[in-house]
Image (cartoon, rainbow, N blue to C red):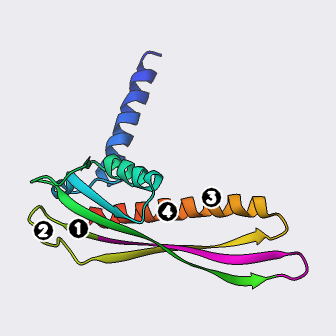
Amino acid sequence: MPAQPKTRRLIVILLGLALSGCGFRLAGTANLPPALSRIHLVTIDFNQQQRDALSRRLQQAGAEVVAQPAGDAVELRVILRILPDRRVVTSASDGKAVQRLARGLDYSLKDSDGDLLGPAKTLKQQKDVLFDQDNLLSADQERRNVVKDLEAALFNQLMRQLERI
C-alpha cells in the first residue's frame, strides 16, 4: 500500500514535466522577452480603470511598469479607439436589433534611446450583439459588458504581439 502514493506522486511529477517541456501554459499568461522587463506605459484615450487593467496584464506577463521614463525602460504607447457602432439587423416585430460593437488599439514600442523596436500596429476586436430596444436598462448593461470584454481581448492580443518581439 505505501508504494501507491509514491507512484502517484511520480506520475504527477512526470506529467508536469511533460506539459512544461512541450510548451504548455495556462491561457491568459504571457512571458515577455527580457528586453521588455521594464515598460514605461503611455496611454491615450484610456480611463483610469482601463489603464489599470492594462498595467495589471503587463505585470502578469512579467514586466515592471514604471511611472516615469527610465534609462532601461522601453516606452509602450497605446491608443484606445472607439470605432463607430453599426446596426447590422433590426426586427420591427419584436424591437430587437443586432449591433456590431468594435474597438481598436494602436500601439508602438520604442527602446530607451527612442528607436522603434518594430512598426506601429493596430489591433481590432468586434462583436455582434443582440439588443432588446424595449428594455434599455438591460441593453446598456449588456453594452458595458461587451465593451469590457472587447477591451480585455485587445489587451490579451497586445500581450501576444509583445511576446513576439
Q: Earlier in the sequence, mark 2 or mark 1?
A: 1
Residue 50 percent across, percent down from the top left: 45, 56
What kind of residue is marked 4? Glu
Q: Nearer the viewer, residue 72 or 9?
A: 72
Q: Position of residue 14 (x, y in %)?
A: 34, 39
Q: Earlier in the sequence, mark 1 or mark 4?
A: 1
Q: Nearer the viewer, residue 92 or 159?
A: 92
Q: Residue at x 9, y 54 (%)?
A: 71
For label 1, the residue is 109
Judging by the rendered image, the residue that carries numbered circle 2 is: 114
* Type of the residue with mark 3: Asn
The residue wearing badge 4 is 151
Q: CA distance from mark 2 to mark 1?
A: 9 Å
Q: Which residue is mark 3?
A: 145
What is the distance, in whole Å, between disc 3 and disc 2 at their CAs?
Answer: 37 Å
Q: CA distance from mark 1 to mark 4?
A: 19 Å
Q: Residue furthest right?
A: 93
